[in-house]
Amino acid sequence: MEKVLEVKDLNISFHTFSGEVKAIRGVSFDLYNGETLAIVGESGSGKSVTTKSIMRLLPEHNSEIKNGQILFEGKDLTKLKDKEMQKIRGKDISMIFQDPMTSLNPTMKIGNQIMEPLIKHQNMSRHAARERAIDLLKLVGIPKPEIRVDQYPHQFSGGMRQRVVIAIALACNPKILIADEPTTALDVTIQAQILELMKDLQKKIDTSIIFITHDLGVVANVADRVAVMYGGKIVEIGTADEIFYNPQHPYTWGLISSMPDMDTDDEELFSISGTPPDLLDPPKGDAFAPRNPYVMKIDLEQEPPFFKVSDTHYAATWLLHPDAPKVEPPEAVKRRQSQYVGTVGAGKFPGKKGEK
């Protein structure tokens, strides 16, 4: 498959009154044409910072890309000037944010907000842009788009506003669409509708999607590949089947165990004890070690490399070392592994050794 984006050894820091927060520490991944890559992890793991760096939307006054490359169509986005980036942002790479009400201008009609990128990036006339805005509203499932195009954001429900935000993001048929927890602010029923809408739209416009979420359940039927982030690093990456049914990292085990399923009979749901690491002073070894019930001495001393599980599946945990003791994953993980039907390594999109 053709790569549309390469992130290589990305390191990002924030300079605060308390000191330097090393928010992203050596993140690398590829995005392939037509795939959906989900990035999952707890709040503070670095998901949004990573993707906002692709859009160059990090605050200039206190953020710094210390090292690494973000390659798109042969260009390193970290090196582009603001004017060059403005030609890419919204046209080739678009973003859907978490809360649609903060993404939309309450004083502007919906139609004008959809027309704006069309006029700026595609040099459309106002009449042509308006017609395209109506088509986009129809595409994302807004009823009576000819009337709705002249209404304001407060006249739409939360789910409808999110559909409008998606229409704006899709206006210029971007090659990459970044969705930053686009369903978190919505109820479960609307959440399912938006996810189904995004799957359907991806087929129609042939775009690649980076989907950010803290909820593994949300991406179960959406993602082709999944990258699990913790402490500013990717700790496991593989196809969706591999991550859900054959996870290898103890952190991924914890995330999956915290998902309720039909076999959950405990009165209390599982939770990962402890808190994420303080990235003002990142730990010496494995960042997950203080919360890892299977922690070994080496976890506290050395950062684990990526171990190959299959051609598409890699995990950074010392438990995969040939000399490591064999440990049994939690019951919730074993239940899913028992459902696994041997599709390991048969993912649609090829992973590469050393992806982080």
Image: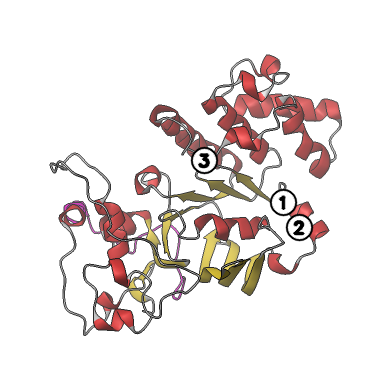
Viewer-nearest residue: 57 or 267? 267
Viewer-nearest residue: 237 or 41? 41
Q: Calculate the distance from the C-alpha at mark 2 to the C-alpha at mark 1.
A: 6 Å
Tell me residue 108's x, y (percent).
Answer: 75, 27
Tell me residue 42's x, y (percent).
Answer: 40, 55
Residue 89, label in figure: 1
Relative to 105, 96 lies left or right? left
Secondary structure at badge 3 equals loop
Q: Earlier in the sequence, mark 3 or mark 1?
A: 1
Q: Amino acid at mark 1?
A: Arg
Q: Which residue is mark 2?
A: 85
Q: Amino acid at mark 3?
A: Pro
Q: Amino acid at mark 2?
A: Met
Tell me residue 215's x, y (percent).
Answer: 38, 47
Instruction: Verify whether residue 199 appears in magenta.
Output: no
Q: Calculate the distance from the C-alpha at mark 3 to the C-alpha at mark 1.
A: 18 Å
Q: Residues within 10 Å of mark 3 (few under 14, many from 20)?
A: many
Residue 226, label in figure: none
Q: Residue at x 72, y 47 (%)?
A: 91
Q: Residue at x 61, y 32 (%)?
A: 101
Q: Earlier in the sequence, mark 3 or mark 2?
A: 2
Q: Residues within 10 Å of mark 1 (few under 14, many from 20)?
A: some
Examine the rendered structure and indicate whether residue 238 appears above or below residue 186: below
Residues drawn in magenta: 335-355
Instruction: Verify whether residue 352 appears in magenta.
Output: yes
Q: Mark 2 near mark 1, Cβ–Cβ under 8 Å?
A: yes
Tell me residue 158's x, y (percent).
Answer: 53, 27
Predominant SS along the magenta part: loop
Q: Which residue is mark 3?
A: 182
